[in-house]
Amino acid sequence: MTDLVNLHISDALDLLNKKEISSVELTKAHLVEMEKGRVLNAYITETPERALADAEASDKRRANGEKLGALDGIPIANKDLYCTKGIRTTAASKILSKFIPPYESTVTQKLKEAGTVMLGKVNTDQFAMGGSTATSYFGVTKNPWGLDLVPGGSSGGSAAAVAAGLCMGATGSDTGGSIRQPASFCGITGIKPTYGRCSRYGIVAFASSLDQAGPMARSVKDCALMLREMAGPDQFDSTVAELPVPDYTLALTGDIRGKKIGIPKEYRPNGLNPEVAKIWDKGIQLLKDAGAEVIDISLPHTKYALPVYYIVACAEASSNLSRYDGVRYTTRVEGKTLDEMYENTRTDGFGPEVIRRILLGTFVLSAGFYDAYYTRAQRVRRLIYNDFVEAFKQVDAIVVPAAPTPALSYEAFKNMSPVDTYLGDVFTTPASLAGVPSLSLPIGLSDGGLPIGLQIIGKHFDENTVFQIGDVLEKSAGFDLNPHRVKG
Amino acid sequence: MYTIQGKTGDWELVIGLEVHCEILSESKVFSGASAKFGAEQNTQVSFIDAAFPGMLPKVNEKCIEQCVKTGFGLNAKINKYSRFDRKNYFYADLPQGYQISQLYYPIVGEGYIEVTTDEGTRKIGVERLHLEQDAGKSIHDMVPGKSLIDLNRSGVGLMEIVSKPDMHSPAEAGEYLRQLRAIVRALGTCDGNMDEGSMRCDVNVSVRKVGEAGLRPRAEVKNVNSVRFVMQAIEIEANRQIDIYENGGQCKQETRLFDSVNLETRPMRSKENANDYRYFPDPDLLPVVLTDEYIENIRKNLPELPEAKKKRYVAELGLTPYDAHVLTLDKETSAYFEAAIKGHDAKKVANWVMGDLFGYLNKSAKSITESPISAENLGALVGLIQDGTISGKIAKEVFEIMTETGKAPAVIVEEKGLKQTTDTGAIEKIIADVLAANMDKVAEIKAGKDKLKGWFVGQIMKASQGKVNPALANQLLDKKLGEI
Amino acid sequence: MSFNEQTIKTIANLARLKFPQEDEAKFAKDINGILDWVEQLKEVNVDGVEPLVSVSPRENAVRADVVTDGSLQTELMANAPESVQGFYEVPRMVE
């Protein structure tokens, strides 16, 4: 039975369809694993009753020969940023620690309709702000590769749960790298799709022009299966593309001969971590071996992506988080006047990183500073966007590291300045600002035995090529997660 | 020119209005909750309006159309590209912590409204019209120490129409507001009910010495919600500023509140003056891009605007400009008028509408849509006078009965036997009786006191209970007198 | 840098946050560090570059004018920290 928690989604679907296993068996195995894995603190809220009910319903559908969803019976976890009807949704914050949404996010609704079983809600950095899950009000999540290590973030709970077999796949969300960096830290696969591919409806907003939902799982194919169910037009989100969603698994041909892959020189600054550089070089070699054409390219404004990102994201966040005011659904800390109540509620309800970003965002939008900071950042964002548009005239995809280092220790993280922690997003923010899709997958291990991932960045709405190349890299790299997994 | 005489000389006023019009639409501007007025608290509120986590706005296409229509009513430039911005501030009736508005790219640009006062007709410039969302309502007197919040209005579409500082008298500002109300009502884009708050006005006022160039600091007077209050507030605020200057003081740019009970303006708390709204483009919403075809299609289907209607009433119906103006101030009145004149003399109908009908409606505090006399019946009444069926005097009586019963005038005339008598024999008989009873006065007429003829006509009318056609009575009276 | 002790008070007030003095100083220091770091954007020549507001490929996402939502008083009040008779309750907003 233990094997059940090591299965890929694609394999589990085969077994379910052949009736060799039931969804209840699969789900129970994961519930047992979740209990054993509690030391990781991956889940904020476990929903075993809901999971078993979902699983029983799925088994019944299968037994009765009813129409099945594409992921029928597959147990997954949802990042606690996705509003789930009747199930507490906290954004890992104190201010929403008691919030029970009366509605369901579009993406989790679609996954529900695809027949998935929900195991629970997983940890994240508070309001998705951070790269470690250390900013969570519910405590840091531990990396299955070493309990003293951070799993990355913000989707660190998702990454840790997927890596440790506490779910088969999980939803994540990515604003500046929040799927791709934790995927790299935990040795799993995740994709930030094109901005506008998935609906943001019902996902607690961090930075609206950057937030994108995406899947995290243990293979490229599993991500392709999940994304197909998560993506698509939605009447509730104006920014979602009205484009049909292809069957991404059909793109996994195993053949990338003649594909043009760009390697941007700006991602190889002086002082690039040698282990990361080594993995990158390995990836490039694997692509060449597979018959792809590797081309040196330039994305000249890369180094400015990080400061642009922090200005834009914090500006939007400062406004998006104004609604948490103690009036309608959050916790409330009373005050004599309305303003006092606001101040008491918000200062008590937000953690220091959230407060820092609200302050920064408020400042860059304030009178006298708006043009110097916010407008300038948006102009540079245009240049970064144009860099990608230009590059994609030349190449089909771009391959770069996912994170500047392997997973860091919690101790090291705690002692870093805010700016130093922000530097962890250096390789992920450019694609976020441009809105292009980017897949992160593990390629190999550091000398210390920690996973290191690469990103495959594609053209707008060309997730197909990204999956196609990712699939070939995955198979040729032969990265094997299981032997290294730490169990509680 | 309107001026205020001060101790140090004459002052002129510089006035601009910012008018918020709630858009007539079924649902709110960014959510599918009802936009209807007057429901029980918090029963027309979606999770979007209450700004729950992860909720996203989506624009109501009707609200865009209403803005474009109104733009045409303001003779304004329709902007093919517009976009939404967030105006950030905290208040309990503003759930998102920001109001979605249009600062940088409004949907409608510059235009004007033609305004007629005693000083003539002027074009008052409109700076812009932008689309935004309304806030909720706070109630302060239900629970001691607490305020209560109702979000039913939160998210209802608003058009904010900003004038240029082109007005120079309270009368002009009042007339601008009346005209604006007439325009939005004619277009069906706002119901214009200032007492229900569906049309609200902030007034910018500054003063300067006559002939002085440049502008002095202005006060923005908030919460001025009727035409009369606008005119009062301007006068009061202008005098307050003049007093300050004439006593050696300086005015500062500030926001003030109009108190219609104590007839004064008061400064708002300094905290509200110190706000920094941190406008920035709303990343949840996309630009609104209008095609020429879309704009042209709206233009083609516009109803007739008050200004055009007024001109038509003068040119085609022969009304005086004043009557045309009064009858086009709101679309209910002009619709009533146009229904009433079908087949009847427009000028006479206009007199009845503006005289007896308005008088009655005023007295009984009814709007024209609540009139017990239908437009068709009022027209018919004029028709009965014109064809000689009844006299003007009887018509007044019939009108009275119509207000009470709502019946058609012909029915009333029939029932009450009010038809004019045209039976010459019968009239001659009445005349003979009246003359016989007043032979002394007949003698006076014979002696040349012609004026007494009018008195006789009166007596004849009285004796016939008004049913005799006065012209016929006159004619027959002359004949009878001649025979004597 | 311009983010001094007065700025932190003004900005915190705009964001309806309030801290003890030592936290103010710490946050001011953090923000100053971040602002120093973003100074590098001044190197970039952005003359004539239009600000990028959205990377969404769409425009004109509109909905039809129909009532589809809103009778939620019970659900709204169930989530409210304080409410009375279907109203949200807050500290008195006027003197």
Image (cartoon, coloured by chain):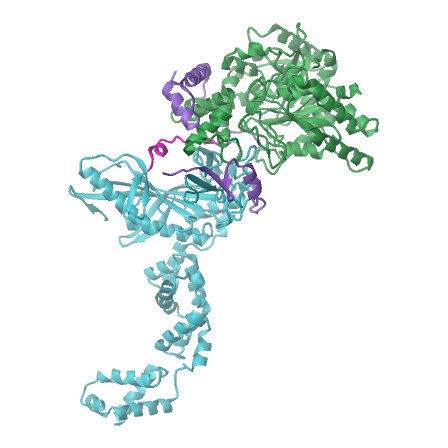
Which colour denotes chain A?
Answer: green
Residue sitting at x 50%, y 37%: C82
Please identify the dominant SS of the magenta region.
loop
Is A62 or A456 nearer to us in this picture? A62
| Image height of A49 relative to B413, above or below | above
Residue that protrudes farthest toward the front in the picture: B144
Which region of the structure is painted magenta? B268-282
Give the x, y percent position of residue C59: 55, 36
Answer left or right for B139 relative to A147.
Answer: left
| Image height of B408 relative to B260, above or below | below
Residue that protrudes farthest toward the bottom in the picture: B484
Residue sitting at x 37%, y 58%: B311
**Quarter where residue B142 is shown:** top left
- Image quadrant holding the N terminus of chain A, namely top right
Residue sitting at x 46%, y 31%: A334
Q: How many marks?
A: 0
**Quarter where residue A201 is shown:** top right
Is A19 or B56 nearer to us in this picture? A19
Q: Is residue B279 magenta?
A: yes
Which colour denotes chain B?
Answer: cyan
Give the x, y percent position of residue B349: 39, 68
Chain (purple):
C
Q: Is residue B425 magenta?
A: no
Res A311 seen here: no
Give the x, y percent position of residue A394: 62, 19
**Quarter where residue B436 is shown:** bottom left
Is A471 or B396 nearer to us in this picture? B396
| Image height of B92 relative to A43, above or below | below
Give the x, y percent position of residue A240: 60, 33
- Image quadrant holding the C terminus of chain A, namely top right
Res B92 seen here: yes
